[in-house]
């Protein structure tokens, strides 16, 4: 699929092919909130089932994601800002949403590992040697829990991944421009303080990069989309929705899949 880093409003994907992943068996798509069928405040490509949107609209939106990716099934999770890792070991005939996980791993083709987002990061991982992929939902709690390096560990133990082989992509998400943590002294560990860019504002993109590199991923293998979802109206943003009202908003998605043979 072809991607456009600064897609027009009607485009579903904000970022399609990433250089490091192109030409491989791996596909990834980082979808904006455009191109779906949901109405405000979920307009329009909302993939979140539990955010108050019409179920039929969400179903249609997920179908649009499958078609755009060219894959028959999506594996997603009802995410809980925890550290549960779900490893898919049986082929999927249809979409499946597992409950209570924040990371998805598989070496099976034709399944789109799908992360649902409204400011949180999706971190997509691809091991081209072992042909295994992972998708991680990582908000600030996930950063504190170090879920990303834990997934690298799961891939190493379960699939033989060597971290130095991994390609990683960090999706559009809350940027250092908007990641204000007034209670950072109680919420964030002291190790995060070096990533404070100005008073109470933190660079969680760099925190994830640092965690990946500490886990053995090469700096040259880490790509960061660098778009702030709170600043850009092209994405759902919990922070922006909270600022503007009750925080009701949809979820855009990031997907990674291995193409079938
Ligand atoms: Zn911002």
Image (cartoon, rainbow, N blue to C red):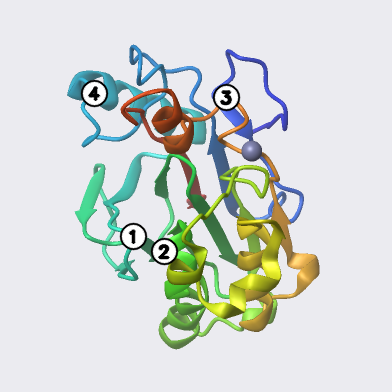
Q: Are marks 1 and 4 in contact (CB under 8 Å)?
A: no
Residue receiving disc 4: 53
Q: Is residue 133 left or right of residue 162?
A: left
Secondary structure category for the residue under label 1 = loop
Q: CA distance from mark 1 to mark 2?
A: 6 Å
Mark 1 or mark 4, which is nearer to you?
A: 1
Secondary structure category for the residue under label 4 = loop
Mark 2 or mark 4, which is nearer to you?
A: 2
Secondary structure category for the residue under label 2 = helix
Query: What residue is at 43 percent from the left and 80 percent from the top?
Result: 154
Picture quarter with the N terminus: top right
Q: Quick one: label 3, few (<14), some, or many (20+) residues within 10 Å?
A: many
Depicted 74 relative to depicted 184: above or below: above
Query: What residue is at 70 percent from the left and 72 percent from the top?
Result: 194
Q: Tell me the tag on residue 234.
A: 3
Residue 257: percent from left, percent from top: 49, 51
Query: What residue is at 25 percent from the left and 33 percent from the top?
Result: 51
Q: CA distance from mark 3 to mark 4?
A: 18 Å
Instruction: Work out whether residue 93 or residue 179 is closer to the camera in this orientation and state it.
Output: 179
**CB of residue at label 1: within 8 Å of ligand 1?**
no
The first of marks 1 and 4 along the sequence is: 4
Residue receiving disc 2: 141
Residue receiving disc 1: 81
Q: Quick one: label 2, few (<14), some, or many (20+) residues within 10 Å?
A: some
Q: Are marks 2 and 3 in contact (CB under 8 Å)?
A: no
Which quarter of the picture shows residue 193? bottom right
Residue 248 makes an appearance in the image: yes
Residue 141: percent from left, percent from top: 41, 64
Q: CA distance from mark 1 to mark 4?
A: 21 Å
């Amino acid at each position: 699929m072809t991607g456009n880093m600064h897609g027009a409003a009607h485009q579903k994907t904000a970022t399609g092919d990433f250089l490091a992943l192109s030409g491989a068996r791996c596909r990834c798509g980082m979808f904006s909130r455009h191109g779906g069928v949901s109405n405000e405040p979920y307009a329009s490509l909302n993939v979140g089932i539990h955010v108050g949107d019409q179920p039929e609209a969400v179903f249609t939106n997920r179908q649009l994601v499958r078609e755009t990716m060219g894959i028959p099934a999506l594996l997603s999770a009802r995410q809980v800002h925890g550290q549960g890792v779900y490893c898919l070991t049986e082929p999927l005939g249809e979409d499946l949403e597992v409950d209570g996980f924040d990371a998805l791993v598989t070496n099976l083709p034709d399944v789109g590992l799908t992360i649902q987002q409204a400011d949180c990061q999706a971190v997509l991982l691809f091991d081209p040697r072992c042909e295994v992929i992972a998708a991680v939902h990582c908000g600030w709690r996930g950063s504190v829990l170090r879920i990303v390096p834990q997934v690298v560990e799961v891939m190493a133990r379960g699939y033989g991944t060597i971290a130095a082989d991994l390609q990683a992509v960090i999706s559009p998400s809350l940027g250092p421009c908007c990641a204000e943590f007034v209670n950072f002294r109680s919420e964030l560990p002291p190790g995060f303080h070096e990533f404070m860019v100005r008073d109470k504002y933190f660079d969680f993109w760099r925190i994830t990069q640092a965690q990946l590199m500490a886990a053995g991923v090469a700096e040259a293998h880490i790509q960061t989309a660098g778009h702030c979802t709170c600043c850009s109206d092209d994405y759902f943003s919990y922070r922006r929705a909270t600022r503007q009202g009750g925080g009701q908003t949809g979820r855009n998605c990031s997907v990674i899949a291995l193409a079938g043979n």
